[in-house]
């Protein structure tokens, strides 16, 4: 009995989930509101009036709204509702609530904007600018921790029981939906829909990752001290020295790790080439950087 008590006393305390502060909740709600508003504008002011659709549940909702003459917001809400419960089970409560809040805002926004006349009736302009605005809005919602489309959740579930990746499943579903637009709106509008979908897809990536993409750098060099000090003084970036072991020789190696922006990549390669032409250099993309000493130092 005494042993059990001592073991329990030595066990680390269970980490408690910290609740978000009111400021963080307001900030999250604001970004979800802005993102949903952008999506509503992209749909009702650009895409829908020109018979151009997006992929996923949004595309299905546009087709059903066109065929039934029912408001788009009704289909956006009810078709996304099952994915709210799936997201709650698969990802968590915060994601599910953020998704539900965003979908409700999007449904209300499209209903309010439906009577507003479109800015342009040129389908190419509508596809380009509608795709941009839609992609920015969806990216803001995803970056804040929500979703406006349940296609990805379906893909994750199907992926567990099929040999296809999540990306392949999403692509197949969206190609089927976008292809259906050809039978409903005509094949020229289906091709405009592909343009809008591609632009929105790219804008989602840009919004989530940002324009200032960061890169991780791994350098293995015998002159690691010189290379590290040069990166610090000439590039203004901090470095970390890691201990490694060569797989062939078994000898100890020093690994230099640092994070830079894509604009600094060429200069870093020049520094390494000057100090150690035989050094091993690997560069990879990073989607997000927080904390530590990533802030750039002054170069003297």
Image: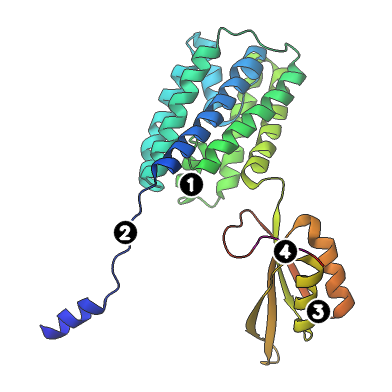
Is label 2 in contact with label 1 (beta carbons under 8 Å)? Answer: no
Residue 156: numbered disc:
1
Q: Secondary structure at mark 2?
A: loop
Q: Nearer the viewer, mark 1 or mark 3?
A: 3
Q: Which quadrant: the C terminus?
A: bottom right
Q: From the image, tell me which residue sits under label 4.
A: 297
Q: Is residue 282 above or below residue 130?
A: below
Q: Is residue 220 magenta?
A: no
Residue 279: numbered disc:
3
Q: Which quadrant: the N terminus?
A: bottom left
- Where in the figure is residue 162, as x and y percent of width and height? 50, 50
Query: Would you call the spot at circle 2 few (<14 residues within 10 Å), some (14-19), or many (20 or more)?
Result: few
For the residues marked 1 and 4, what is the alpha-carbon distance in whole angstroms? 42 Å
Q: Is residue 295 magenta?
A: yes
Residue 16: numbered disc:
2
Tell me which label, 2 or 4, sits earlier in the chain: 2
Q: Nearer the viewer, mark 1 or mark 4?
A: 4
- Where in the figure is residue 173, as x and y percent of width and height? 57, 35
Residue 99 seen by the camera = yes
For the residues marked 3 and 4, what is the alpha-carbon distance in whole angstroms? 25 Å
- Where in the figure is residue 20, as x and y percent of width and height? 39, 47
The residue under the point 66% across, 11% down is 118
Tell me which label, 1 or 4, sits earlier in the chain: 1
Q: Is residue 255 above or below residue 214?
A: below
Locate residue 92 relative to residue 226 in the image: left or right. Answer: left
What range is drawn magenta here? 294-298
The residue under the point 55% across, 19% down is 62
- Where in the figure is residue 32, as x and y percent of width and height? 50, 33
Tell me which label, 1 or 3, sits earlier in the chain: 1
């Amino acid at each position: 009995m005494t042993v059990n008590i001592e073991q329990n006393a030595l066990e680390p305390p269970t980490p408690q989930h910290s609740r978000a502060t009111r400021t963080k909740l307001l900030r999250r709600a604001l970004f979800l509101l802005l993102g949903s508003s952008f999506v509503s504008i992209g749909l009702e002011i650009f895409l829908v009036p020109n018979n151009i659709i997006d992929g996923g549940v949004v595309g299905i909702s546009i087709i059903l709204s066109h065929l039934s003459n029912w408001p788009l917001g009704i289909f956006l809400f009810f078709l996304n509702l099952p994915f709210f419960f799936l997201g709650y089970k698969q990802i968590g409560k915060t994601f599910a609530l953020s998704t539900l809040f965003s979908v409700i805002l999007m449904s209300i926004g499209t209903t309010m904007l439906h009577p507003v006349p479109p800015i342009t009736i040129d389908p190419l302009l509508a596809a380009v600018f509608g795709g941009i605005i839609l992609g920015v809005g969806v990216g803001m919602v995803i970056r804040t921790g929500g979703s406006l489309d349940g296609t990805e959740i379906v893909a994750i579930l199907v992926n567990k029981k099929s040999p296809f990746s999540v990306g392949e499943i999403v692509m197949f579903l969206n190609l089927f939906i976008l292809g259906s637009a050809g039978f409903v709106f005509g094949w020229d509008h289906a091709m405009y829909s592909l343009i809008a979908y591609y632009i929105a897809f790219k804008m989602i990536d840009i919004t989530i990752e940002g324009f200032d993409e960061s890169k991780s750098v791994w350098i293995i060099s015998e002159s690691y001290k010189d290379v590290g000090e040069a990166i610090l003084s000439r590039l203004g970036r901090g470095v970390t020295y890691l201990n490694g072991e060569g797989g062939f020789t078994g000898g100890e190696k020093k690994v230099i790790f640092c994070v830079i922006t894509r604009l600094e990549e060429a200069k870093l390669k020049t520094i390494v080439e000057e100090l150690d032409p035989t050094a091993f250099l690997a560069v990879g993309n990073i989607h997000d950087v927080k904390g530590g000493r990533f802030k750039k130092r002054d170069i003297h």
